[in-house]
Image (tube, rainbow, N blue to C red):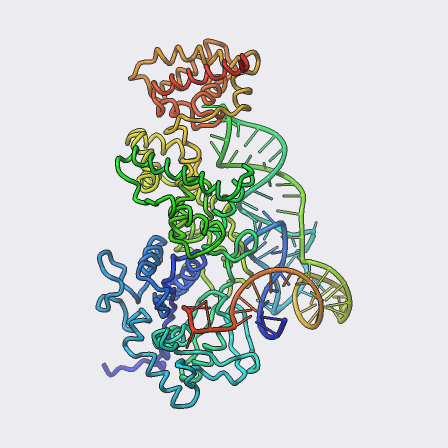
Amino acid sequence: MNAQPDTPPVPPTRPIVTRFAPSPTGNLHIGGARTALFAWAFARKHGGQLILRIEDTDLARSTPESTRGIIRDLQWLGLDWDQGPNAAPGIDPYDLASQKGDHGPYFQSQRHDAGIYDKLIQKLLDSGQAYEDDGAVRFRMDKDIAFDDVVFGHIEIKADDLEDFVIRKGDKGGRLPTFHFAVTVDDALMEVTHVIRGQEHLAHTPKHAALCDALGFARPKWVHLPSIMNADGSKMSKRDKAKAARKAAHTIAADHNEPIQSVIGRLWSAWCSATKKYKDQFGKDNPIQYTEKEFRSAYTAFVIDKEDSAISLEELDTIATTLTIIKPPEIQVSDFWKYGYLPSVLLNYIALLGWNPGDDTERFDMDFLVEHFDLSRIGKKNSQFDRVKLAKFNGEALADLPDNEFHCLLHDHFANNHPEYIHMLGDEGFKIFAAAYQARSQTLDSPTELGRFFVDGDFDYTPKAVKKNLTKNDGEGLNVLRQFRIELEACGDDDWTGDTLHKLIESFVEKHQLKNMGSVAQPLRVALTGSAVSPEIGPTLELLGKETVLNRIDRCVEAVDRQVQGPG
RNA sequence: GGCCCCUUCGUCUAGUCUGGUCUAGGACACUAGGUUUUCAUCCUAGUAACACGGGUUCAAAUCCCGUAGGGGUCACCA
């Protein structure tokens, strides 16, 4: 007990504390996800703490739905926090008693209710560093100020370039603190050591530094991250989705040489038939219902870039996607989820935007990131988001998955997004479908583009594919198709499996002295898919089923014959 | 516009602090060839960058100055 160490005790160092502080005014977008990732990685690397704090000081724009969405997206990504709202299922994140950590509450609206900000504002008022202005409170910015940023270095601003700024809103804003005041106070009170956030806050940091000084708080280390941009160099934003839909509408108008209103009219018809199809397929009404008037006015607003439409951006986005007039650009974390990216891959890819481990390693998991993460390796340059590279990473990760894991993921994805495939293929069929597309999928959604013909026989024949595989050389392929149809018809139901059918083709090739399997497989592909592309021919035949295969061959032969004989 | 920040292949980047080993490396994309029943995968090879102009130096992608271009910010939004 009284034994003292020989050496003086090491002075206690402050544990690393980072925070992610979104404002709940929309979904978590990709830039926010990277900020969260870096804050998470830095805290984990140093055995520190990550705080999730919700900055809901904007009464008009903050919503509980956004808070829940952000929490859900962070959980999907696998980024966990040590202090903040409780994300356990069934628990209301706003519930004070359930929040984790000693520095709560973790919602700024709740902190305001607790009087945390008003007390400090009064201090500034009393000392003359702040003053009342038309119901609001402003902070005096009358001195030169300098600060150090971990990424951008030393920055100095002259007093002349600074202005007094509001720290507490007036009655209209509920007398809540502004972002600048709340963020400064909370970071200090929550003992945050490293403020990791987007570069858009760099220009605000002089305010935060001055506030820290006036309040007598130690300044945290500021770490500003460069922005993530679109391929064209513009900033990534959810408005891009509307932009894409708008562009699509205008493109359709131009292609058909018709006014935009008539395009919207056609979209309405398309929407009606999509709704009807939904009902036929699922036996219940489409949960999204509009009157023609609503639809037209909302879409018009959408197309001419107005936010105040009767239908929300998200719903219009859904419509545009349903009608397949656009494949909206992925912007928010939930988009990447919806389009079948793996969270581990998304995280890997966005970690590479502005950071790298210093060698040529590009594919890594979060254990690697935590081990190697270092603030000094964060770059200063904005980076463009390259969906093609992400897709490649994702495709490789999917291909590397054990079969059964891929099957489960694909099944979940399709159950949520394209249940008609599961209905039509059945559980056994879906297994074959998954196996057929694992190596061919860049996302869990890819099989819908590649394998639509499995559930939809209403396709046109690609002229090039018909010529090359059927009509060329006096209809060589067409003859093979006719003859092979006979063998298929003779095939018993028990023999209708991928392996047996594959062998059937092999022996047919041998018997007729054909060049190779392609001589049979390619004509079949055209008949079955309309194109020259499908997964392996065996599983393709098996999955389609005997009846469908024979019908499609007949339909194809007929169509090509008609075409060869010419019109009339 | 004021202020702040940034600038290496088409894109993400290594290299810049501590000038020479950089005739600038990797990845994605692209092109060509090979494997494959198609597609995808895979293998091999290739095209491709230090924004521009001055300086400092024996030597500059690396240091300094200027120009151009880009981004951010300038709300009782965050």
The residue positioned 37% from the left and 83% from the top of the image is A121
In this rendering, the answer to whether A383 lies above or below B47 is below
In this rendering, the answer to whether A200 lies above or below A129 is above
The residue positioned 34% from the left and 41% from the top of the image is A417
Depth order, front residue of A6/A500? A500
Residue B36 spot, x, y in % from top left: 49, 25
Residue A371 spot, x, y in % from top left: 42, 59
Is any part of residue A401 visible from this angle? yes
State the image quarter where residue A275 is shown. Answer: top left
Residue A201 spot, x, y in % from top left: 48, 69
- Looking at the rendered image, the quarter that the N terminus of chain A falls into is bottom left
In this rendering, the answer to whether A251 lies above or below A457 is below
Depth order, front residue of A320/A357? A320
Is any part of residue A49 visible from this angle? no
In this rendering, the answer to whether A459 lies above or below A253 is above
The residue positioned 47% from the left and 81% from the top of the image is A210
Horizontal side, residue B42 vs residue A217: left or right: right
Q: Residue furthest front?
A: A293
Q: Residue furthest bottom?
A: A127
The residue positioned 34% from the left and 53% from the top of the image is A76
Residue A436 spot, x, y in % from top left: 39, 31
Numbered circles on residues, count: 0
